[in-house]
Amino acid sequence: MSVNKNRSKSLAQLRVFCFSPPQGMISYWWFNGLVNAFPLHFLHFSQFSKNFIGTKKTAKEKILFRFEHKVKTLLEHPISEREIEVIEEIWERLDELIKNKNN
């Protein structure tokens, strides 16, 4: 089975869990695995739910950790002009997202 097909199935199951919380230990483990794999999607699917308060906090922390870890990894080595351009492009895109959120 292809990675994209597995990804699609996993995201579909995560969406189901967000609308109908998992019941039972195995389902709960499955749910947590999906949240760890797709924290942004989880936040999207569960944004209107009053459930998952602790899980939402954990997902946000995981996202922040990923960003921080990637930036720290880049800064461990001398940075090239091309890397600076790419990072500045990423910052511009993030600024656009923030601006769109505020409008």
Image: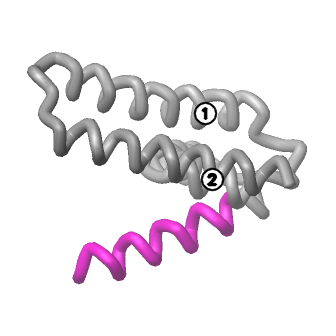
Question: Does label 1 or label 2 sit earlier along the sequence?
Answer: 1
Of residue 30 and residue 67, the one placed in the foreground of this image is 67
What number is the disc on residue 60? 1
Q: Amino acid at mark 1?
A: Lys
Q: Secondary structure at mark 2?
A: helix
Of residue 13 and residue 92, the one placed in the foreground of this image is 92
**Which residue is outermost to the top?**
76
Residue shown at 49% from the left, 31% from the top = 62
Crowding around mark 2 (Cα neighbors within 10 Å: few <14, some 14 to 19, many 20+) is: few
Residue 34 in sight in this render: yes
Frontmost of labels 1 and 2 is 2
Where's residue 71, x and y in %?
Answer: 32, 27
- Magenta stretch in the rendered image: 1-17
49 relative to 57, above or below = below
Q: Amino acid at mark 2?
A: Glu
Judge left or right: residue 56 versus residue 82: right
